[in-house]
Amino acid sequence: MTVNLNRRDVLRVAGAALASPWLGSSAQASWPTKPVTVIVPFPAGGGTDAFARPLAAQFAKLTGKQLVIDNRGGAGGTVGASIAARAAPDGYTLFMGAVHHAIAPSMYPRLDYDITAD
């Protein structure tokens, strides 16, 4: 089978391919429209917090919105994880977990959250 393409056909396809990322973006709402909270399940000054603070500064530069670091330490990080699991699922509460959360179900038999579902 022979395909007969002229220069205009190629330019049309190339133009459509280049414009396609912007076609869907006009239908999406901009995010974030309000400050975003990151729950860090360990006290301020720890390793996880030391990672979250520079992340918050970059987030503010890129989006113009504040990234609030909420340190909720206690019980090996499960207190903060429980608070994050109960947060509204609106995309404005994030959770910064660590390896501790993978082993928490074997250490604490009655967690307030399901590590795989929440």
Image (spheres, helix red, strand yellow):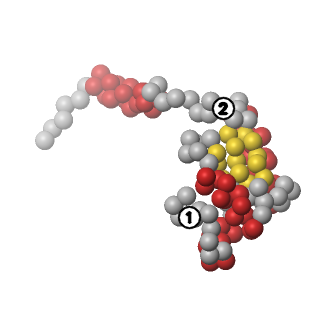
Give the distance between the C-alpha atoms of the residues marked 1 and 2, in whole angstroms.
28 Å
Amino acid carrying label 1: it is Asp
Residue 39 image point, x, y percent: 71, 51
On the rendered structure, is 19 left or right of 2?
right
Furthest residue to the bottom?
Answer: 106
Q: Amino acid at mark 2?
A: Lys
Q: Is residue 79 left or right of residue 90?
A: right
Element under disc 1: loop
* Mark sitting earlier along the chain (1/2): 2
Residue at 65% x, 67% y: name it: 101
Q: Is residue 88 above or below residue 48?
A: above
Query: Residue 70: percent from the left, percent from the top?
Result: 76, 48
Q: Which residue is mark 1?
A: 114
Q: Write down the quadrant of residue 103 in the picture.
A: bottom right
The residue depicted at 65 percent of the width and 59 percent of the height is 82
Circle 2 SS class: loop
Where does the C terminus fall, quadrant-wise? bottom right
Query: With 87 as the anchor, is 52 left or right in this view?
Result: right
Instruction: Decide if residue 52 is in sight here.
Output: yes
Q: Rate crowding at label 2 as few (under 14), some (14 to 19) or many (20 or more) other CA atoms within 10 Å.
A: few
The residue identified by callout 2 is 34
- Visible residue check, residue 18: no
Q: Is residue 20 above or below residue 100?
A: above
Q: Residue furthest left?
A: 1
Residue at screen point 62% across, 71% down: 110
Q: How many marks?
A: 2
9, 70: nearer the viewer: 70
The crowding category of the residue bearing disc 1, from other C-alpha atoms within 10 Å (few below 14, some 14 to 19, many at least 20), is few
The percent position of residue 37, horizontal first and vertical second, equals 70, 43
**Residue at screen point 34% across, 25% down:** 11
Q: Quadrant location of the N terminus?
A: top left
Residue 44 image offset from top left, x and y in percent: 84, 55
